[in-house]
Image: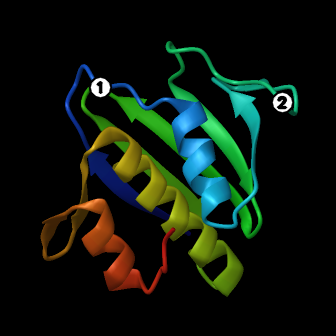
Amino acid sequence: MGVERTILHEPDLLPDWAVVRGLLIANGETATIRMIDGLPAFPDEIPDATWHELRVGLTGGMVTVKRRVGQLLCVTWGTGEPALVRSWNLLNYCLTKATHGTIQMETGPVNADDFAKSVGITTS
């Protein structure tokens, strides 16, 4: 079963993949874009500003990021593997940090740093 988190941000502030990737690397995660808008991506390809859906290969597995106006949906399938959960959480953190947004949690919206603390991620 898929699990999803919603990240809200200013509608005119698009996530810059170079910033997100830099945050991931700084926190010990490798990330490769596997697909952009349903099409295969080159290993070093950077999505342009018009992307709507990314498939991101992370250490723990694959995560899909869907972009809507003012929000990002971060989806993964299954949460049984601790490595996948950590990678998914870290991508959520980095997307939120890069957009200066908030993650919608059951208890309400939280910023990137509070989210990291709540899920036990130590960030750089």
- Which x, y percent locates residue 64? 59, 47
87 with respect to 10 (left or right): right
Of callouts 2 and 1, which one flags the residue occurring earlier in the amino acid sequence? Answer: 1
Tell me the SS state at disc 2. Answer: loop
* Residue most extreme to the right: 43
| Residue 55 marker | none
18 with respect to 74 (left or right): right
Q: Residue at x 56, y 65 (%)?
A: 88
Q: What's under tag 1, amino acid-wise? A: Leu
Q: Is residue 81 visible?
A: no
Q: What's under tag 2, amino acid-wise? A: Asp
- Which x, y percent locates residue 10? 20, 31
| Residue 44 marker | 2
Q: Residue at x 54, y 43 (%)?
A: 20
Q: Residue at x 37, y 59 (%)?
A: 5
Per the image, the residue denoted by label 1 is: 13
The answer to whether 76 is drawn above or below residue 17 in the figure is: below
Residue density around tag 1, few if under 14, some if 14–19, many if 20 or more, within 10 Å: some
- Which x, y percent locates residue 45? 78, 24
Q: Residue at x 67, y 41 (%)?
A: 55
The answer to whether 112 is drawn above or below residue 56 in the figure is: below
Quarter location, residue 1: bottom right
